[in-house]
Amino acid sequence: MAEPAPVSLLLATGNAGKIREFRALFAELPGLSLLTAADLAALPEVIEDGATFADNAIKKAAQIAEATGLLVLADDSGLEVDALGGEPGVHSARYAGQHGADEDNNEKLLQELAQVPDPQRTARYRVVLALADLRGPLGARVHVEDGVCEGSILRVRAGSGGFGYDPLFAPRGYACAMAELSPEAKNRISHRALASQKMRAFLATYLPTRLG
């Protein structure tokens, strides 16, 4: 009997850094074929206006699953800085005003924390992954997993890897910025890696029910 065709999983993000990490994190999951927006004619634009990462991830996954009929993985993530009351939080990608302007976002963060002493520069990366499959066994339900990576904010940028706030974020237990880690090392400890590990475990049990 021929092997069943793999299930297509659409990564609902246009962020090249996230796509690169998701491809690595889900690469070895049997029965799964990863798609991105580049593989489709067009995707609907989803306004991420939720108050939490979960709100945004769930909304994005559900709307894109409805529009495409595919199994969809969406995420929302960001940086929470304790000295800033949890900011930039859900506004991380547009902290300095323009969406995805990493350099400007990092510069604003350094300015906001200029007078904050090192012991008070604690922070964390947080992510919520949302899986929607309106035409599959999940139905209207959206499955959610999350991940957190604790750390602190450096005073100067370091490293050229990663994206976002990685040049300023030092993971707990590491004397370097996230941007100085190899992709393999980052994909062992990052918030996205931890959430993806849980989502992989869910998919390992879910995909057989969808194929069956």
Image: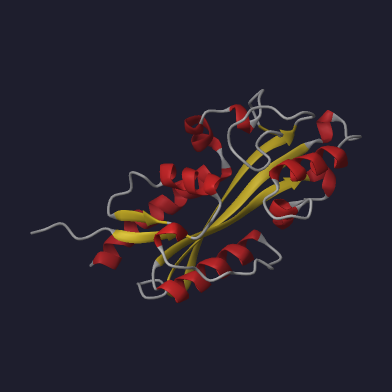
Would you say 39 lies left or right of 92 here?
left
For the rendered model, the colour scheme is secondary structure
Would you say 156 lies left or right of 73 here?
right
Rendering coords of residue 152 (x, y %): 73, 34
Question: Which residue extends farthest right?
Answer: 115
Rendering coords of residue 210 (x, y %): 29, 67
Question: Which residue extends farthest top?
Answer: 175
Rendering coords of residue 193 (x, y %): 50, 43
Would you say 20 lies left or right of 49 here?
left
Which quarter of the picture shows residue 208?
A: bottom left
> Which quadrant is home to the N terminus?
bottom left
> Which quadrant is home to the C terminus?
bottom left
The relative height of residue 15 versus residue 54 in the rendered view (above or below) is: above
Rendering coords of residue 160 (x, y %): 62, 30
Camera-side residue of 85 and 21: 21
Would you say 136 lies left or right of 21 here?
left
The relative height of residue 48 versus residue 30 in the rendered view (above or below) is: below
Residue at image x 69%, y 68%?
49
